[in-house]
Image (cartoon, rainbow, N blue to C red):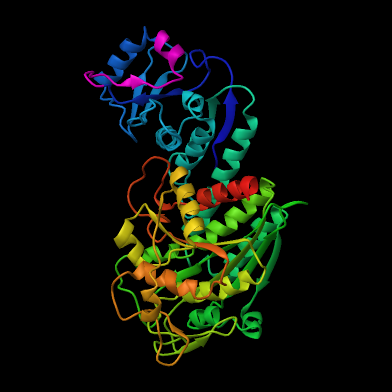
Amino acid sequence: MSTDLHIANGSPVTADVDAVVIGLLPAADGEERPRLATGATEIAEAFGGETTLADLLAVVGATGKADEVVKLPTRGAITAPLLVAAGLGAPDEGGEPHADQVRRASGSAARALAGSGRAVSTLGRLDLGAAAEGTLLGAYTFTEYRSNGGGRAPVGAVGLLAEDGQEEVLRTATAVAGAVRTARDLVNTPPNDLYPETFAARARELAEAAGVEVEVLDDEALAAAGFGGVLGVGSGSSRKPRLVRLRYAGGSEPRAKVALVGKGITFDTGGISIKPAANMDHMTSDMSGAAAVIATTVLAAQLQLPVAVTATVPMAENMPSATAYRPGDVLRMYGGKTVEVLNTDAEGRLILADAIVRASEDDPDYLVETSTLTGAQQVALGMRTAGVMGSDDFRDRVAAHARATGEDGWAMPLPEHMRGELDSRIADIANVTGSRWGGMLVAGTFLRAFVPDGLQWAHIDIAGPSFHSGGPYGYVTKGGTGVPVRTLHALLTDIAKNG
């Protein structure tokens, strides 16, 4: 069930709804009461003025800090019986909260309104697009596998107060949030139901509904074409690998050609180099990169962006068995390079290398790859900040979009000396080094060996940001997050405008 969004007209004071949402900022220097954010003037007047309302909210514990939600009975001051104050956190020096603060507050408010029928939010007056995205993402639930229906339903409908003429802003934000929700659904689907064959079928269903061309290579086609990396990683599973190709033409005059590549390991045991049992269940999210590029390609078609987008998505299940690939094996990759496998748990880079070479054959202007590539990303940058590597200028461009969208990303180097550490005694390259240091950069260096010279490319390591195992915050719910769909959308929009 999804929340219905629309642009609301009229005054929130007389709106026939169950709740009205306002934004709240922390107290100014020397003050004790929180401050009302822009857009709540009529509500404040109905309560006797801004100071009176702020004092009331302070009495019930409101401070305006980020992710805080305080509910106040209106006692007839306005038509709605409940006032919901969502904390925005301290604004920037300009005095107004930035987009992601609005997005987070809207998400927190939407989650707090679960079980409600209708609400009106003044946060749309701050930033309609951010408020829409935050509301839809904060209200997200995944109840497919709950026999009791999953508890309270998300808020039924939210009217966002905003200036006239912003229908296109709402349409775009709704589509973007829908793509993130699609990626979350895919990540949250358990691996006994989402494996290469069914994942490919789901990708086909999504793509065809949006008019996107689809090609699926099964294990026999992969063998005939020489996709040694995908076949090697998938050899231990009874569920055979796939490679999915989605093509959106970008209209009659596309501004550029963009190749997207996403890692689709539907479950990762580590293979023969098996992982510890603790938290192995999180490896249901090892296909988050694939989910993101599938959702983004479909989104580009839905929004008719003037950019040609081709997604190349390798899918495999990494299992230990009598047929599994082993440490010491040499794989002949798509395109001819050979890789000595020293650790079967460094499998993502193997399927991605095949996909990168195949994607590069389309002669794209840009190539972006995203994956849950390394635990080292989590060690270096934590669970919320993606590591971005690649061509220096393009890498920085991608990382800037990640920060601007609130998904967060940080540019990382690819030191030249690390290529030597990947030298193999018998093959062109090894899949890991003998050192524990710089694992994220090592993986990026390995991938760079398969990128053609001169191609602008970037890798986004989302090992931490793609899956949230703690309690919800802002618009982030437990489980799959949908990162980096919004980053990729922002990048494609930028390329559509600026090349």
Toward the viewer: 463 or 399? Answer: 399
- What residue do we see at 40% from left, 72% from top? 416
Q: Is residue 32 within the magenta segment?
A: yes
- What residue do we see at 59% from left, 81% from top? 334
Residue pushed farthest top? 48
Query: Vertically, is 15 above or below 185?
Result: above
Q: Position of residue 295 (x, y in %)?
A: 58, 54
Query: Vertically, is 173 above or below 59?
Result: below
Residue 91 appears in the picture as rendered: yes
Q: Position of residue 456 (x, y in %)?
A: 56, 62
Query: Vertically, is 73 above or below 262?
Result: above
Q: Position of residue 77 (x, y in %)?
A: 41, 10
Q: Tell me which corner region of the image, top left, top right, bottom left or bottom right, holds residue 417.
A: bottom left
Quarter of the picture containing the N terminus is: top right
Which range is magenta? 29-46
- What residue do we see at 62% from left, 55% from top? 297
Toward the viewer: 427 or 499? Answer: 499
Residue pushed farthest right? 252
- What residue do we see at 56% from left, 76% from top? 354
Q: Is residue 334 within the magenta segment?
A: no
